[in-house]
Amino acid sequence: MPLAHIYILEGRTAEQKRAVIEKTTQALHEALGAPKEQVRVLIHDVPKSDWGIGGVPAKDLGR
């Protein structure tokens, strides 16, 4: 059972997350031959204040 953890900055829409889940599932199905029903995708919404880029929180960078 493949398990994909996806970390993204907060603020994505439900539709965007749905697309990530669908496309990740399809990619693992194609690459590994895993049945789609066995693929698990977890999306972690990370607050911008908790995501650092170049030593600075993403929130401070206006991301």
Image (cartoon, rainbow, N blue to C red):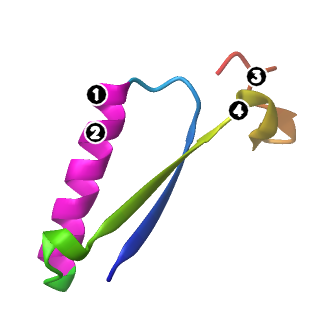
Q: Position of residue 6 (x, y in %)?
A: 48, 54
The residue wearing badge 2 is 18
Question: Horizontal and vertical percent for residue 48?
Answer: 71, 29
- Quadrant position of the C terminus in the picture: top right
Q: Which mark is residue 53?
A: none
Q: Quadrant of the N terminus?
A: bottom left
Q: Which residue is mark 3?
A: 59
Q: Give left or right: position of 4 versus 11.
A: left
- Going from N to C along the chain, the mark reached first, 3 or 2, is 2
Nearer the observer, 58 or 43: 43
Side of 26 relative to 54 (left or right): left
Under mark 4, the amino acid is: Pro
Q: Is residue 43 above or below residue 28?
A: above
For label 4, the SS is loop
Q: CA distance from mark 4 to mark 2?
A: 19 Å
Depth-wise, is mark 3 or mark 4 nearer the camera? 4
- In space, the residues marked 3 and 4 are separated at their CA atoms by 8 Å
Q: Which residue is mark 4?
A: 47
Quadrant hosting residue 55: top right
Seen at 74% across and 40% down, the residue is 51
- Mark-to-mark CA distance, 3 and 2: 24 Å
- Report the residue marked by disc 1: 15
